[in-house]
Image (cartoon, rainbow, N blue to C red):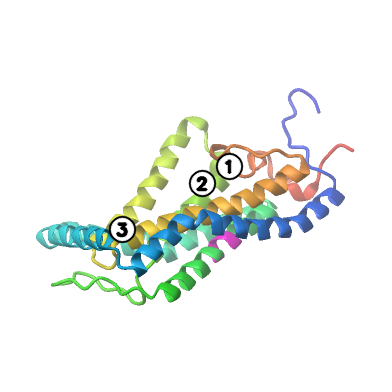
Amino acid sequence: MTRGDRRPRWPARAALRTADLHLGERLAAATAAFVVASVPAGVLIALIEAEWRPLREFDSGAAERLHTVVLQHPGLLQVLDVLSNGVWDPVTMRLAVAAAVLWLLWRRAWRLAAWSAATEAAAAAVGLATKTAVARVRPHLDAPVAHAPGFSFPSGHTLTATVSCGILLLVTAPLVPRRLRPAVWGAAAVSVFGVGFTRVALGVHWASDVIGGWLIGAALVGATAWAFGAWRRELGLGVPAAVDGLEPELAAPRSDAPTHSRTGH
């Protein structure tokens, strides 16, 4: 490789196939890692099931205070509704990830596309399973300003936003100039925390539902990203820092995608 040639040097096809087989084992290990990372969420669920008084007071107090503010400011209610059910709606978030997956397929970044799709699908499955298992009733407030179907814990909007923003950040980081990365991460943080605020303010979730969505979403992205990093480590590609994304090679031309295995051997 010459000094000016910055194209990635991918392993041979045989090494890639072997690593892909081991990726299944890594994903199984990631499931175990997810269980461990979800311990804080498990503790929160236990406190909810035990009807722990400090948590109940925290939830009811936050719901009543925010609900009072929203009732007094109709304009704020409209803004929150648009943000919650338009900008940060789970369908919108999933479509954004789907667009990223299609782009990754076009770039021939097959494994990263699979990671993105699998992580998003896992979030939907975990969220539904947890809601069904906990079966928590949504808040009942006087003069409700919004309604939502199904059970309350965790907040599906918050869980989806956490996972979707995590996926998009880790996929697109190599393409974002370093000077702009703080702004991009800041926008993602605003989305993740903002959607949680809207769900409580609209009276369709308890504050602990939102916290649960954050915890479960972060645990899921962290576990699957760890599995992807373990696959790279096995190939000798190195594991980049989170701010550099999961696959820094995406910054290279499309013809140098991992499936081409350009190693120079």
- Residue 71 visible? The answer is yes
Tell which circle, 1 or 3, labels the residue nearer the N-terminal end: 3
Q: Quadrant of residue 211?
A: bottom left
Specify the segment rendered in magenta.
117-121
Q: Is residue 261 magenta?
A: no
Q: Return the residue nearer the eye: 23 or 39.
A: 39
What residue would you read off at disc 3? 83
Q: Return the residue nearer the eye: 197 or 39.
A: 39
Disc 2 marks a residue whose amino acid type is Leu
Left or right: residue 171 compared with residue 24: left
Tell which circle, 2 or 1, labels the residue nearer the N-terminal end: 2
Instruction: Identify the mark at residue 169; answer none if there is no mark.
Output: 2
Disc 3 marks a residue whose amino acid type is Leu
Does 81 sit above or below residue 252? below
Label 2 close to label 1 by CB (< 8 Å): yes
Q: Is residue 120 magenta?
A: yes
